[in-house]
Image (cartoon, rainbow, N blue to C red):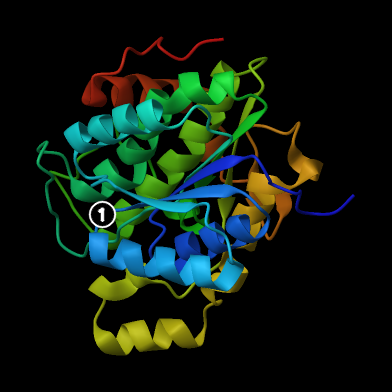
């Protein structure tokens, strides 16, 4: 059994697809024959990535849709538009992420790292779940990070108002990705929709743009290329070997054990409820 399936006839949506791991993931899925929707915030960058992927693969089934994942209204607008223009969704790859040195708030008044890296995943996925269920078997792939092991979900200060560190906020958000995956998988049991997450490896991507240039250059010396970093995302999105697995965390295409807090079902349930409150989603909206 090959690692990656023939994806002809499958519709795959990849967020943050204009650069780094997202772009490479979209390229690989297009190569496998999938219809790929690139979700980007910036039109010019998105169009450049789309043109590059079309040229590299010869595929005409690559399209660009714009969405600002820091805005809940824009996520809702995007989800509505996607559902009116696409009859199915086989794979959702939540990949877009930010690292911000200084505390920033979104148009919704939320701390931006938490809002984009976690609530963006949460809201987009829940809004598209009906379509995923109708397309089953379908998959949700959440890009997390090994940095989650240094994270902690402090329900008394989810927005980093009392104490903010860019690195800590990033680690917390990546822990939230795993907890979200775990609770999502539990709620989707029996629906034919699976949810898994991954650590792509230490990858040199645009997420480090906010760091001082010397530090960014040093990071690039010791990190993987986006091509290698995207391998696990592509594997979880396409491989027949993982079609029945759900709620798992992978590193280098191998199932791994995340931190103790990442495996805490009570924290996962509480985070789900709080995320639902912050996004206006009914907490019990996703139940099989």
Q: Is residue 19 visible?
A: no
Q: Quadrant of the C terminus?
A: top right
Residue identified by numbered label 1:
41
In the rendered image of this protein, does residue 85 appear above or below residue 29? above
Residue in view at x 18 percent, y 32 percent: 73
Horizontal side, residue 188 vs residue 38: left or right: right
Instruction: Tell me how many marks there are.
Output: 1
Within-10-Å neighbours for mark 1: few <14, some 14–19, many 20+: some
Horizontal side, residue 95 vs residue 161: left or right: right
User: Residue 43, position in %: x, y?
Assistant: 25, 59
User: Residue 20, position in %: x, y?
Assistant: 44, 68
In the rendered image of this protein, does residue 62 appear above or below residue 207? above
Q: Toward the viewer: 135 or 174? A: 135
Residue in view at x 36 percent, y 13 percent: 283
Horizontal side, residue 10 vs residue 166: left or right: right
Q: Is residue 198 visible?
A: yes
SS at badge 1: loop
Which quadrant of the structure image shows residue 111? top left
Residue in view at x 59 percent, y 54 percent: 233
In the rendered image of this protein, does residue 141 appear above or below residue 234? above
Residue in view at x 23 percent, y 32 percent: 77
Q: Toward the viewer: 92 or 208? A: 92
């Amino acid at each position: 059994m090959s690692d990656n399936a023939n994806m002809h006839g499958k519709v795959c949506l990849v967020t943050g697809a204009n650069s780094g791991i997202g772009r490479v993931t979209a390229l690989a899925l297009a190569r496998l024959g999938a219809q790929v929707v690139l979700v980007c915030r910036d039109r010019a960058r998105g169009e450049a990535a789309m043109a590059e992927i079309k040229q590299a693969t010869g595929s005409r089934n690559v399209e660009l849709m714009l969405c600002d994942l820091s805005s809940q209204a824009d996520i809702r607008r995007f989800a509505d538009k996607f559902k009116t223009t696409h009859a199915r969704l086989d794979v959702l790859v939540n990949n877009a992420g930010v690292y911000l040195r200084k505390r920033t708030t979104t148009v919704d008044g939320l701390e931006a790292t938490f809002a984009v890296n976690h609530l963006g995943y949460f809201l987009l996925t829940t809004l598209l779940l009906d379509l995923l269920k109708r397309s089953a078997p379908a998959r949700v792939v959440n890009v997390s990070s090994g940095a989650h092991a240094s994270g902690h979900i402090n329900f008394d200060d989810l927005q980093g108002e009392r104490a903010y560190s860019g690195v800590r906020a990033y680690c917390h958000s990546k822990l939230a990705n795993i907890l979200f995956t775990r609770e999502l998988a539990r709620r989707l049991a029996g629906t034919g929709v699976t949810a898994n997450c991954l650590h792509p490896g230490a990858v040199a991507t645009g997420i480090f743009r906010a760091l001082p240039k010397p530090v960014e250059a040093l990071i690039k010396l010791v990190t993987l290329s986006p091509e290698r970093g995207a391998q696990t995302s592509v594997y979880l999105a396409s491989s027949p070997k993982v079609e029945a697995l759900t709620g798992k965390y992978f590193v280098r295409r191998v199932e791994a054990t995340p931190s103790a807090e990442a495996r805490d079902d009570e924290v996962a349930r509480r985070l789900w409820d709080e995320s639902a409150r912050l996004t206006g989603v009914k907490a019990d909206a996703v139940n099989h």
